[in-house]
Image (cartoon, grey):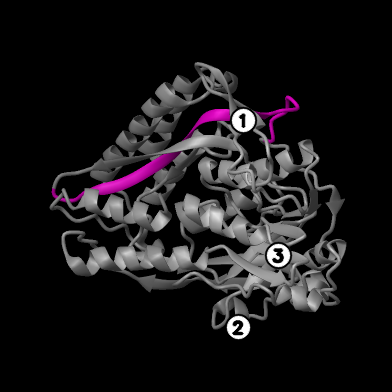
Amino acid sequence: MSSAKFKIFLASLLLCFTSPLPAQNPPAAAQQISSFDRGRTRMMLENIANDIRKHYYDPKFHGIDWEARVGDTKQKIDKAAGLNMAFSNIAGALDSLNDSHTFFLPPSRPYRHDFGLELQMIGDRCLVSRVRPDTDAAAKGLKPGDEVLAFNGFRPTRQSLWKLEYVYNTLRPAPGVRLVVQSPEAAQRQVDVLASMRQLHNVVDLTTSFDLFDLIRDEENEEHRLRARSVEYGDDLMVLKFPEWFMEESQVDAIMGKARKHKALIVDLRQNPGGSVDVLKYMLGSLFDHEIKIGDRVTRDSTKPMTAKPRSHNYFQGKLLVLVDSRSASASELFARVVQLEKRGTVIGDHSSGSVMESMHYTYKQGLDTIAIYGASITDANIVMADGTSLEHNGVSPDELVLPTPAELAAGKDPVLAHAAELCGVKLSPEEAGKLFPYEWAKR
C-alpha cells in the first residue's frame, strides 16, 4: 500500500470516532504538566511496554531488566517537570534497548517546527548538507559545507546525530538551537538558529472535510516529493534516484523495464531511510534470473529465510552501481549488501547507517471527549545476512569510498554520482551531477 493510500485508510478509521484530537502546547509553554497528563503519560508507557513484552524479537531484551527499566521510568514520569520531559522519559526507556527500529512516536503538536537546515555525517564529520531559503538559518549565513562542531553543547557523531535531531525536533521541539560551526577557509563561530513555527489547528477534527482533506493533501504532496526519478543517457546509462522504498509493484516493473534498455544502471540510495520489504524483494528480483537469499529473518520464535524471487526471465543484466551514504538505512542497506555478497555490482559512497532491523508500528489512542493518538515502532525481527553477519550497528562498507568535500557541498557539486557515471562510460562533471535531481523541500 502506498503511503498516501495508507494515510487515507488511517483517516477513514479515525472517522469512526466523533471526537477531535487534543492539542499539545507549543515549546514556549511546554513546561507545565497536570496530574491528568502525568497519568496519561504513565499509561502510554505501560501500553508500549506491554507490546514490547509481547512482540520484541529478543525475549531477553539484550540482557536488560525490562521490568526494572519500566518501573524506573514510571518514577521519572512522576517527577517530570513538563510533558515534553515525560515523553523523553518514555523515549529513553525504549532507547535503552539500543535498537534502531524501536522508538517512541509522541502525540503530534499543533504546529510545524523547522530549523531550516539539514545535517549529515560525511565520513566522521557532521556537515550542513542543505539550508532552506528564507529561514533564520539562511539569514545567519549557514551554508552547505559548514562543519557543525557542537549542537547545543554536544559534538555530533554517527551514533549521536539522529538522537539530537529526534530530541530537538520531535520529543522536545526547541524554539532554537546553538551551533558551533566551521566554514571552509573561515574562522570557527557560534550561531543561534531559531526554528520557524507555523501554528496549525489546536484541534484536528477528522469528522470535517476541511481537516480530513488537508491531511490527505499533505500526504500526497509528501509522496510526490519522495517519488522515484530517473535520468537517461542514450542506451548507455540510466540513473535512478530512489528516495524511499514505498511504491506499487507495477511502478517497480515500469522503472526496471526502462532500465533494461540501458547498458548500465546507477541506483542512488543516498539519504534513503528504507521502507517496504516487499519493494526490496521486487527490486532485487529484477536483477537476477534466479532466487536469491537476502538473509535470515530471526524472530523470538523462529528463524526463516528471506528470499527474492526473479520477477521475470527478462531481468536487467547490465552493469550495476549502488550509491549509499550515512543516511542510507534499513532496506537500502540490505539492497547494497546483497549486491556485494552476490557480486552483482559495485557499491560507492560513504559507510551506511547501520540501522537494519524489521519492525511493526503500533498506534494507540487515549481519551473519550478528545483522543490522544501516539505510537511506537517495535522491532520484531533481526535480519542476518547470507554471510552470517547483521548490519545493525555495522552498516555497509562501500567498495569505493568517495566523499564530497565541504567545498564541493558548498558549490553544489556531486563528485560521487559523477565518479559512478564515469565508471559507466558517461562523462558527467560534478557540477552537472549536482543539478540532476533538484532537491524539493517538505511543505512547512
Q: Is residue 420 left or right of residue 102?
A: right
- Between 369 and 283, the one lying in front of the other is 283
In this figure, which residue is indicated by the disc labeled 1? 383
Residue holding disc 3: 238
Asked whether residue 95 is drawn in magenta, I would say no
Do callouts 3 and 2 mark residues in contact (Cβ within 8 Å)?
no
Residue at image location 57% in from the left, 81% down from the top: 133
Give the residue type at disc 3: Met
Of discs 1 and 2, which sits in the foreground? 1
Give the mark nearest the N terminus, 1 or 3: 3
- Callout 3: SS: strand
Identify residue type, mark 1: Ile
Would you name the residue on which mark 2 appears?
A: 139
Q: Nearer the viewer, mark 3 or mark 2?
A: 3
Residue found 49% across the figure and 50% down from its top: 249
Where is residue 374? Give x, y as percent. Answer: 34, 45
**Mark 1 and mark 2: Cα distance apart in space:** 45 Å
In this picture, residue 133 sits left or right of residue 196 = right
- Specify the segment rendered in magenta: 369-391
Task: Say which element carries label 2.
Answer: helix
Q: Does 264 appear above or below 193?
A: above
Residue 305, percent from left and from top: 60, 24
Residue occupying the point 40% across, 22% down: 54
- Sequence-wise first label, 3 or 2: 2
Marks 3 and 2, Cα distance to the nearest angstrom?
A: 38 Å
Instruction: State the SS at label 1.
Output: strand
Q: Is residue 387 magenta?
A: yes
Residues marked 1 and 2 touching at CB (< 8 Å) = no
